[in-house]
Amino acid sequence: MKYVYEATEGEFLALMDTIKSVAKTVAWTSIRHAKLRRTATTLRGAFTAALAEAVAEEAVGEAGEDNDEGATVTPFRIVPKPETVATPVPVPVETGDKAAERAAEEQRVRVLHGKDQWIALIEVWRENFGIEGTAQPDRVGSLHAAASPFVGAYLQTREGLTDATREAIYLLDGGDPSVVVLPRYGLTNRQLREARLVAENIGQVASFHAPWLGELLEYAYEYRTLPTEE
């Protein structure tokens, strides 16, 4: 003999609440553990099938008891919420050549900015330089402003302070700005001597206020042999 237990409406609702609670717990756990996520998907399918079957059987039993042939019972169906997976945004990957080109361009910009700062420093330094009894500019303040990584990048492209000062004087005196590497014969003897004296003075002041800059002073071989005239 087959025994069938008929649950009351209250028992059925309580069972539904229990199943929902278990499903919710599994869902929350699955979020925190990738392996359980697959298990939760399987369990949700099993819960859905079991509930649909139970509701269908209950509906058939009620229809038989009521003997209402015109009644239509539509068992409800639990639709699991689809898992939302964020689509990763592709990140452009720079090739070695592009990265090198970008680095070279950034370095070129730093050098040009440092060159402008150095020229501005030399312009201030030359004002009444070596002329006693005249107003003197704030050379120390200008030196602090010029002691920047940009100037350091620019000076790395020159032989030292003297060479960089030659280029600044050459450009400040109306020289051709298209000259990339300034040859020594592009300046007059007066400009070469002035560049040497200015660079030496900058090196002396920088030895206290910006030691790393003062260490870049190089001694040009022709300084002692240059005639005083042009």
Image (cartoon, rainbow, N blue to C red):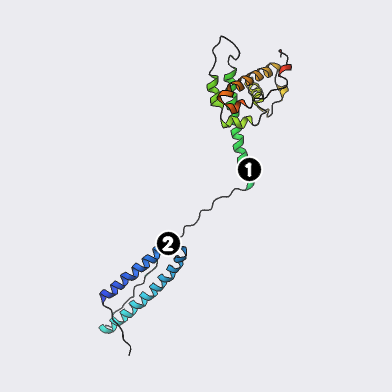
* On screen, residue 181 above or below 82: above
Badge 1 marks a residue whose secondary structure is helix
Residue 96 horizontal/vertical position (percent): 63, 47
Q: Earlier in the sequence, mark 2 or mark 1?
A: 2
Label 2 packing within 10 angstroms: few (<14), some (14-19), many (20+)? few
Residue marked by disc 2: 31
Percent across and percent down for residue 120 are: 57, 23
Residue 98, percent from left and from top: 62, 45
What residue appears at the point 60 percent right and 21 percent down from the top-left corner?
204
Residue 40, compared with residue 127, is above or below; it is below
**Quadrant in the rendering for residue 128:** top right
Picture residue at 32% right of the left edge, 70% below the top: 18
Task: In the rendered structure, find residue 100 and report the number of the disc placed on it.
Answer: 1
Total numbered badges shown on the rendered structure: 2
Query: Residue furthest toward the bottom?
Result: 1
> Is residue 205 in view?
yes
Q: Quadrant of residue 58?
A: bottom left
Where is the C terminus found, in terms of image quarters?
Answer: top right
The quadrant the N terminus occupies is bottom left
Residue furthest toward the top? 133
Give the side of residue 100 with respect to residue 2, left or right.
right
Q: Is residue 115 left or right of residue 47?
A: right
3 displayed left or right of 221? left
Residue depth check, mark 2 versus mark 1: number of the one nearer the observer: 2
Q: CA distance from mark 2 to mark 1?
A: 43 Å
Residue displayed at 61% across by 25% down: 214
Q: Toward the viewer: 105 or 208?
A: 208
Label 2 residue SS: helix
Binning the other alpha carbons within 10 Å of mark 1 as few (below 14), some (14 to 19) or many (20 upward) gives few
Residue 52 location (% of width, % of height): 36, 75
Type of amino acid at the residue the image marks with label 1:
Ala
